Image (tube, coloured by chain):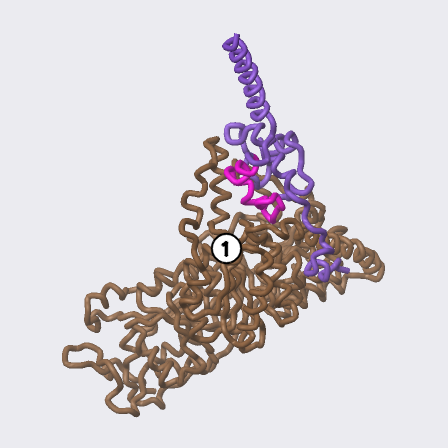
Chain colours: A purple, B brown
């Protein structure tokens, strides 16, 4: 009896664990996203926080959807290198978007004295 | 008129040139006369790394000439010497000389001579040589001499000579200076035979320094200029593109006058500071849109005009026009008057409607006059109505950059926007000049030109002409040396990869007390190449994980502040937290204002 109960409990636990693991695989992960963002070199042009630069557009605070990013970077017209699926999967793009959405919004321009006193230019 | 001859050259019993002072203190040497010639041109500096074939001139500059006008500036590498002369010219607007030893010094100098050549910068490159084999004492004299040394740099110098007498030297120096400084301005090379420097001049009074007579730069044909003016006045959307146009502050003033007369937007490619960034017709950031809408485009001293009116897909090398059909194209430049074959600086061929062969700055007064002559009152009123539109565009562009600069403001590594704006905050009340950003301002996302007020010609000196690294630091030192006398505060944004080519220039700055603030853009990588390598790897679908191999400057990280300190330069950093920037920069500014160089190492985002 005890053995049967134990076996059932293990089965349930195993199933639950598997479901959790599956959920972890499919759920976008900000932590994985940040690692991928750095590994595949997004930060080179877009900045470590996705803030953008002269070489790459800002990806934060208004982060595009994973689908919008995927549709752009698969062919990537212009200066940006194309990212085929072999290099960056749809799941990895979702992870990156999850990471970018955790980046705190930047301070407002007018809360930064150096930028506030500059302008706007007339 | 008798001149000193080679028979008067002092030699010892073995036939070698005698070392040390002359037989009598009153003797005058060939190199003394050479210094007289240099003084007559008011040559201020000779950037030099010492060597045996230039010792005569070296001694004459420092002793006979009193080491003043010209003053010898000690350089740790001939490449640095050439870059310093490059930067010096762009700040002082008069040439300097470099002095290098034989074939080896010449080859070291070559890269930054090439940068100067592509950048239309005049300088006088003096190379020592021992042309007569009978005068060569050691094996190294043979290795370091050549029959035709200037052949090594002939592809990127405008003219060269190897004068074999002092009279010829005087004429060659004058001719070289004149050729170098007549637009298109370029470096020239003079090979100076070592025995000629050592020659004892028997009758100094027989030597005459030739009078210098500068050439007037060539102006574009008046008929072509009138036709260009007619097209510009009739255009609905004329656009002006300027690159190495403003050779002097007057060039900027003239461009402003032309742009205002037409109310035409200016795209400033930044070869020089052509247009004040504060002016409402400075529309560089709207370039693509303006070019696409233009019906007449005027290119002023644009090297790659084709590249401005077309776009290239680097991946498959296809291109498409950026202009609409029927757009009239006008160029005014010296590109067709002077060019060399081997190096491909002439760029892709651009078919245009009016190609005026003339110096841009020199031709502008005639063009402005021609524009005003055909501009009736009615047309003036129409053009005047455009001003508001461009004022709004200019303000919107500035505001967009200001908003974007806030992104990543608190990031570590420090954002390039934060670094540039913290720096500007410290210098904006000085009479500042951004003397170098290395090979490209793109490396710092062009934040200075987005948000700083470049309202004077001298506030920006352009980049390395050929994009060759190893230019930024020494060019900044040369420019700062010029600015020291002009009372300007020199600042350089220094890329780390470029720094490591020629970091001995910091010692030169310390030794000669050159006030220069160097702010390290330390992204610990050859970032441009990392990006390009990544693109290549992606095209090949083989992953990008290894694009840091050969491009990252890590493991170990370089401590630039320690390097600077070791060369006697005040330093701070590495700074990783953006909040630590302001106090370090403020202290560095105080050091520079007291007359010394300073370096602040900032660990930055890639771009």
Q: Is residue B114 left or right of residue A18?
A: left
Q: How many marks?
A: 1
| Residue B365 shows in this picture | no
Residue sitting farthest toward the front:
A2
Residue numbers of the magenta segment:
A33-56
Residue sitting farthest toward the left:
B13
- Crowdedness near tag 1: few (<14), some (14–19) or many (≥20) residues, C-alpha within 10 Å: many
Chain label for disc 1: B
> Under tag 1, what secondary structure?
strand
Q: Residue at x 54, y 70 (%)?
A: B91
State yes or no: residue A40 in magenta: yes
State yes or no: residue B120 in magenta: no
Question: Is the residue B438 above or below the residue B12 in the image?
Answer: above
Q: Residue at x 47, y 63 (%)?
A: B473
Q: Quadrant of the N terminus of chain B?
A: bottom left
Question: Is the residue B594 above or below the residue B272 in the image?
Answer: below
Residue A48 at x, y = what percent? 57, 45
| Residue B480 shows in this picture | yes
The residue indicated by pointer 1 is B522
- In terms of depth relative to the viewer, which is nearer, B315 or B77? B77
Question: Is the residue B119 above or below the residue B484 in the image?
Answer: above
The answer to which image quadrant residue A79 occupies is top right
- In terms of depth relative to the viewer, which is nearer, B55 or B175? B55
Residue B528 at x, y = what percent? 50, 48
Residue B75 at x, y = what percent? 39, 69
Residue B312 at x, y = what percent? 56, 41
């Amino acid at each position: 009896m005890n053995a049967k109960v134990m076996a059932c409990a293990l089965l349930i636990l195993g199933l639950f664990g598997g479901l959790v693991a599956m959920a972890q695989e499919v759920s976008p992960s900000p932590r994985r996203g940040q690692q991928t963002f750095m590994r595949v070199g997004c930060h080179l042009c877009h900045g470590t926080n996705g803030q953008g630069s002269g070489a790459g557009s800002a990806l934060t605070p208004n982060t595009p959807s994973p689908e919008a990013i995927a549709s752009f970077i698969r062919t990537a017209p212009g200066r940006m290198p194309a990212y085929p699926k072999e290099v960056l999967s749809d799941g990895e793009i979702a992870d990156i978007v999850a990471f970018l959405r955790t980046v705190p919004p930047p301070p407002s321009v007018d809360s930064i004295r150096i930028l506030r006193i500059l302008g706007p230019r007339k | 008129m008798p001149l000193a001859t080679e028979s008067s050259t002092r030699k010892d019993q073995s036939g070698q040139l005698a070392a040390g002072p002359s037989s009598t203190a009153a003797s005058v040497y060939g190199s003394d006369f050479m210094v007289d010639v240099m003084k007559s041109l008011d040559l201020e500096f000779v950037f030099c790394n010492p060597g045996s074939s230039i010792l005569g001139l070296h001694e004459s500059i420092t002793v006979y000439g009193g080491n003043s006008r010209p003053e010898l500036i000690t350089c740790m590498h001939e490449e640095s010497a050439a870059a310093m002369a490059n930067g010096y010219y762009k700040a002082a607007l008069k040439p300097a000389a470099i002095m290098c030893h034989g074939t080896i010094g010449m080859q070291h100098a070559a890269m930054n001579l090439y940068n100067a050549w592509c950048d239309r910068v005049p300088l006088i490159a003096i190379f020592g040589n021992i042309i007569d084999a009978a005068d060569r004492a050691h094996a190294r004299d043979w290795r370091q001499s050549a029959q035709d040394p200037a052949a090594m740099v002939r592809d990127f110098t405008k003219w060269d000579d190897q004068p074999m007498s002092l009279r010829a030297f005087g004429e060659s120096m004058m001719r070289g200076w004149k050729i170098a400084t007549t637009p298109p301005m370029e470096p020239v090379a003079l090979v100076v035979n070592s025995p000629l420097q050592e020659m004892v001049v028997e009758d100094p009074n027989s030597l005459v320094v030739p009078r210098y007579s500068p050439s007037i730069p060539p102006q574009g044909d008046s008929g072509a200029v009138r036709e260009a003016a007619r097209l510009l006045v009739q255009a609905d959307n004329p656009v002006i593109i300027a690159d190495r146009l403003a050779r002097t502050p007057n060039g900027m003033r003239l461009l402003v006058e032309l742009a205002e007369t037409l109310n035409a937007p200016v795209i400033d490619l930044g070869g020089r500071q052509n247009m004040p960034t504060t002016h409402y017709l400075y529309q560089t950031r709207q370039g693509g849109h303006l070019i696409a809408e233009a019906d007449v485009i005027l290119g002023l001293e644009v090297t790659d005009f084709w590249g401005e009116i077309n776009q290239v897909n680097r991946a498959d090398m296809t291109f498409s026009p950026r202009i609409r059909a029927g757009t009239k194209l006008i160029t005014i430049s010296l590109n067709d008057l002077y060019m060399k074959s081997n190096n491909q600086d002439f760029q892709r061929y651009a078919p245009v409607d009016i190609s005026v062969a003339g110096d841009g700055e020199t031709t502008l007064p005639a063009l402005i006059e021609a524009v005003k002559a055909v501009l009736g009152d009615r047309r003036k009123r129409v053009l005047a109505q455009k001003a508001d539109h461009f004022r709004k565009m200019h303000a919107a562009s500035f505001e967009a950059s200001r908003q974007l600069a806030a992104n990543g403001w608190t990031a570590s590594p420090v954002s390039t926007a934060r670094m540039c704006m913290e720096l500007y905050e410290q210098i904006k009340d000085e009479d500042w000049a951004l003397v170098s950003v290395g090979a490209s301002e793109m490396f710092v996302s062009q934040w200075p030109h987005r948000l700083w007020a470049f309202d004077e010609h001298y506030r920006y000196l352009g980049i390395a002409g050929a994009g060759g690294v190893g230019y930024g630091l020494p060019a900044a030192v040369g420019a700062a040396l010029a600015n020291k006398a002009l009372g300007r505060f020199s600042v350089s944004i220094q890329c780390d990869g470029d720094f490591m080519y020629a970091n001995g220039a910091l010692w030169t700055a310390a030794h000669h007390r050159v006030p220069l603030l160097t702010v390290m853009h330390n992204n610990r990588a050859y970032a441009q190449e990392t990006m390009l390598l990544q693109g290549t790897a992606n095209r090949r679908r083989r992953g990008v994980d290894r694009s840091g191999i050969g491009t990252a400057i890590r493991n170990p990280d370089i401590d630039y502040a320690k390097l600077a300190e070791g060369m006697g330069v005040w330093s701070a950093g590495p700074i990783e937290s953006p909040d630590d920037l302001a106090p370090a920069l403020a202290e560095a500014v105080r050091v520079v204002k007291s007359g010394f160089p300073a370096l602040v190492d900032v660990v930055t985002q890639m771009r």
